[in-house]
Image: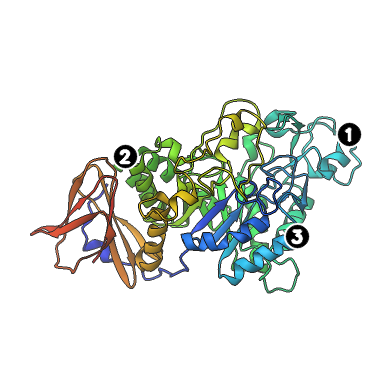
Amino acid sequence: MRKILLTICLWLPANRVNSQPEVIYHVFQRSFFDSNGDGNGDLPGIKQKLDYLQDLGVTSILLTPLYLSDFYHNYFANDFEKIDPAYGSMADYLALVKEIHQRKMKIYQDVEMQYVTGEHQWFTDSYKNPSSPFSNYLLYNDRKNEQPYWFFGVPEFTTYNNSREQIIMVNMKSPAVRDYTQKLLTFWLDPNGDGKFEDGVDGYRLDHMMDDLDHAGKLTQLFSGFWAPLLASLRQRNPAIRIVAEQANWGSYGFEYLSEGKVDRVFAFRLKHAIESFDKASIMKAADSCFLKQESQVVFIENHDTKRFASTVNQDPGKLRAGAALNILPGGIPSIYYGQELGMTGAQLKGATDGNDIPIREAFDWYGSGTGSGMALWYKGTGVWWDSSTVRPNDGISLEEQYSDSLSLFNCYKKLLRIRKETPALADGQYQPVMNENSYILSFARIAAQQKVLVFINLSSMPQAAEIPVKDKVTVMKIAGAGNFTRTAAGIRSAIQPYGYLILQY
């Protein structure tokens, strides 16, 4: 790790382009807010809570898949063209998009195009029927279409409600499949086809994106053969769209997705894993790779497939606050998973059913009582995930309990997002590592054309101090944080409270 002095950090690339600062809120909509009392979170429920999201500091909403599915999470489609009725109607969706855009916010859809369920027309029509017009839409291991290529070789999956479902791999080498996918995703960009996009999605999250799907050797070179030309066609329709890929390999920095798959953003998985360790060297190494080589990173500490961060850190209040700072301040595009701002807990259970992921997808906790109008308790009484539910009364993990508490985790997130919005260097500045001698204090600079800031984050449960050498005399002032600084003959010395942060402008 090279030693970087503050004077070196004043350099800013001439081709740096300012962009609208963005904060993504990742919604598992079935669990967010129920508008009609049927137990399922829905699209009108999200619309009703846009004031809450804007109050928090969110600018964009990422939905999990909307399409009809036998799976509660909707990642495997029965029909790509129908909205799950539990979420609402097409009119409900268009009303949500209109309201989001009127508020100058953005909306993204999550899509999983590589698989379909056994109820999808492509399968019901082509199974044991080689003459079907959909015969080439799916992969079969024989000419009679009697041996489908099952998802990870498993013929049936058990769902949380004990139904048995099939998942079949889509033939993404088929020109018909690519044409269908292009038409489908183009439709959601501009549902009424008028070319104005007020009613359309602002981009997509591509779930489980791979160049060699499932490393099976059957669908290879998908970046160049499927995704890159498809995304090019979507950008011809609307050049403003943004595509983020979920790397199937969570150990990947995702650079090949950007260069070969031609997506706009990838997820900072390596940085997420480093943040969980609270190890300075690991965090700096991951941050350098994420932000110095490629800044198109979506930074997160939890999502719909991972253990809740609060459970990872055993609900340690200090680590929860430091985690928020590490999520929001270093760079990239912060993404907050619904309920993360409250410290909601949850970890996957063990077993062969998709219900084992419900603990990380529980109802957003709106009320101190754990019940009330809008609570999306769709999984009530369905299994061990309900019996061990972490949505409990009077545990401090609800919006009602935290909203007016200035020291709550919710207000910590709200404050950090406000600071980021009001501080140009944090909203859009280039990341630069800054070395110090303390192994518990992470320090880095964020540099924009109009402002430069220095950030310290204490990764320990004890007060810490660190000195940054500065060659030139510069004016330094505190912007925010649980700490202070002094000028020394050699530079700037910071003193930071346990798991606190300090933001200085210089």
Viewer-nearest of discs 1 and 3: 3
Q: Give the residue furthest to the top.
A: 351
Viewer-nearest of discs 2 and 1: 2
Instruction: Classify mark 3: helix, strand or loop.
Output: helix
Q: Which residue lies under the disc numbered 2?
A: 279
**In the rendered view, does 386 fall on the left or right side of 334?**
right
- The amino acid at mark 1 is Lys
Q: Which mark is residue 56?
A: none
Instruction: Classify mark 1: helix, strand or loop.
Output: loop
Question: Residue at point 73% right, 49% down?
Answer: 86
From the viewer's side, name the closer residue of 229 and 469.
469
Q: Which residue lies under the disc numbered 1?
A: 128
Q: Which mark is residue 90?
A: 3
Instruction: Classify mark 2: helix, strand or loop.
Output: loop
- x%, y% of residue 58? 50, 60
- x%, y% of residue 61? 57, 58
From the viewer's side, name the closer residue of 65 and 342.
342
From the viewer's side, name the closer residue of 419 and 371.
371
Viewer-nearest of discs 3 and 2: 3
In the rendered view of the protein, which quadrant contains the C terminus? bottom left
**In the rendered view, does 68 fall on the left or right side of 107?**
right
